[in-house]
Image (cartoon, helix red, strand yellow):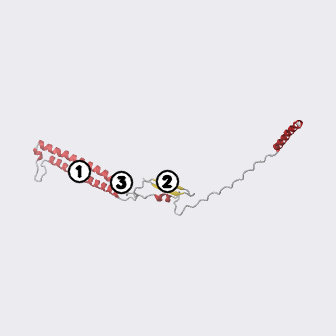
């Protein structure tokens, strides 16, 4: 019995080795390449609904803008010209008034120094020619001052009227909408949103 075991063990080991060698020589199947997935068809661009503005259409881009009516050029620039003219005329009128006061001061000084220089004729003019000439200069400066001051007042009234007319006239601007949104549809069907700021 022990002799049979001695022969059986080597036989089992030899059979195991032969079986392992045969399995090692069997060809390993190559992995099969995966089937390529069919490519999905590209989405066809859909036409935008009728009436949708295009992004490259300048008329459609400006369609949402609010038209603001501007004042005429005569009013826009005329009010500033009248205001500047009113200041200039008031300055010239004030200067002519000061000159009239200065010349009349010379008459008062002559009368204080010598009463004969201030004698008057029956028509109210000064009998002394120099004093009468000074008085005529005074009247001339007074007339100029009055003309400049009247012109300045009229120019100031005109400028004020243009300012009031421009501020109170309707401009067509929407109320309480500081930002106006803009939504347009692209050619590929996407939507573009933006903000239009008018100033």
- Judge left or right: residue 46 versus residue 96: right
What residue occupies the far front of the structure in this picture?
1
Q: Secondary structure at mark 1?
A: helix
Q: Secondary structure at mark 3?
A: helix
Q: Secondary structure at mark 2?
A: strand
Cα distance in 3D space between marks 3 and 2: 35 Å
Q: Which mark is residue 77?
A: 3
Numbered marks: total:
3
The residue pinned by badge 2 equals 194
Task: Give the answer, above or below, for where 81 lies relative to 47.
Answer: above
Q: Residue at x 26, y 50 (%)?
A: 90
Q: Are marks 3 and 1 in contact (CB under 8 Å)?
A: no
- Judge left or right: residue 125 versus residue 185: left
Q: Nearer the viewer, mark 3 or mark 2?
A: 2
- Tell me which label, 2 or 1, sits earlier in the chain: 1
Give the percent coordinates (x, y) of residue 21. 83, 41
Give the percent coordinates (x, y) of residue 38. 68, 55
Q: Residue at x 21, y 50 (%)?
A: 142
Q: Residues within 10 Å of mark 3 (few under 14, many from 20)?
A: few
Q: Nearer the viewer, mark 3 or mark 1?
A: 3
The residue pinned by badge 1 equals 145
Closer to the camera in the image, 184 or 108: 184
Quadrant of res 39:
bottom right
């Amino acid at each position: 019995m022990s002799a049979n075991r001695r022969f059986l063990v080597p036989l089992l080991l030899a059979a195991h080795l032969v079986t392992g060698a045969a399995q090692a020589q069997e060809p390993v199947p190559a992995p099969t390449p995966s089937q390529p997935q069919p490519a999905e068809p590209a989405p066809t661009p859909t036409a935008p609904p009728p009436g949708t503005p295009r992004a490259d259409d300048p008329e459609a881009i400006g369609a949402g803008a609010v038209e603001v009516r501007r004042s005429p050029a005569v009013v826009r620039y005329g009010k500033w010209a009248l205001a500047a003219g009113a200041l200039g005329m008031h300055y010239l009128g004030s200067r002519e008034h000061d000159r009239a006061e200065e010349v009349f001061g010379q008459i008062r000084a002559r009368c204080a120094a010598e009463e004969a220089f201030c004698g008057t004729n029956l028509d109210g003019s000064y009998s002394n020619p120099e004093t009468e000439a000074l008085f005529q200069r005074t009247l001339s400066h007074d007339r100029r001052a009055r003309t400049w001051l009247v012109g300045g007042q009229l120019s100031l009234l005109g400028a004020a009227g243009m300012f009031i007319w421009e501020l109170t006239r309707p401009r067509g601007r929407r109320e309480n909408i500081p930002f106006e949104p803009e939504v347009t549809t692209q050619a590929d069907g996407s939507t573009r949103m933006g903000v239009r700021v008018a100033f």
